[in-house]
Amino acid sequence: MSLILRPARADDAPALTDIAHAAKRHWGYPRSWIEAWRPVLTLTPEYLARHRVLVATEGPRVVGFYALEDEVQRWSLGHLWVAPERLRGGVGRFLFADAVRRVRELRPGVLRIESD
């Protein structure tokens, strides 16, 4: 099945939040850390409306997403998450390549990536 990319909708917020939390938990961080990160990992309809958030789907299922935040002087990759059961299947590569392509189309420049 092929991946389809579409803009996030307000009603995607719970599913995107679930993916972000599940993906972070996948790496074995302590529960206390996951709880501390809850606000950062929680996607709201307001966040989705304010930023460019693209969702990758396989059929009806959301399997990953990314968010570009416009910081005027540069872009920031605010989120890039893949559902744990789809890791190592090319979804992350697909999302990252699209994010870079989109930055080049919108306003070429610096793309800041914060990672742990």
Image (spheres, rainbow, N blue to C red):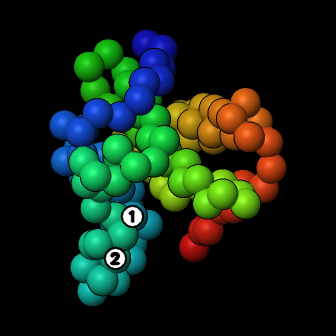
The answer to whether marks 1 and 2 mark residues whose Cβ atoms lie closer than 8 Å is yes
Q: Residue at x 35, y 46 (%)?
A: 48
93 relative position to 37: left or right: right
Mark seen at residue 76:
none
Q: Quadrant of residue 36?
A: bottom left
Q: Nearer the viewer, mark 1 or mark 2?
A: 2
x 68%, y 35%: residue: 106
**Label 2 packing within 10 angstroms: few (<14), some (14-19), many (20+):** few
If the image is split into quadrants, where does the C terminus sit?
bottom right
Query: Residue 105, relative to residue 85: is it above or below?
Result: above
For the residue marked with disc 1, what is the amino acid?
A: Lys
Whole-angstrom CA distance, mark 1 to mark 2, is 9 Å
Instruction: Give residue 75's position: percent from left, percent from top.
Output: 66, 54
Nearer to the camera, 13 or 31: 13
> Label 1: how many residues lie within 10 Å, few (<14), some (14-19) or many (20+)?
some
Q: What residue occupies the far bottom of the structure in this picture? A: 32
Split into 4 quadrants, where in the image is the N terminus? top left
Occupied quadrant, residue 35: bottom left
Amino acid on which the number 2 mark rests in the picture: Trp
The reply, left or right, for residue 113 in relation to residue 18 is right
- Residue name at image x 61 percent, y 60 percent: 71
Secondary structure found at label 1: helix
Q: Earlier in the sequence, mark 1 or mark 2?
A: 1
| Residue 24 marker | 1
Q: Specify whether 50 is left or right of 89.
A: left
Label 2 element class: loop
Q: Where does residue 69 sit, x and y in percent of width and height?
A: 54, 54
Q: Does 22 sit above or below residue 116?
A: above
Where residue 113 sits: x, y (%)? Answer: 66, 62
Identify residue for label 2: 37
- Closer to us: 106 or 87: 106
Q: Is residue 88 visible?
A: no
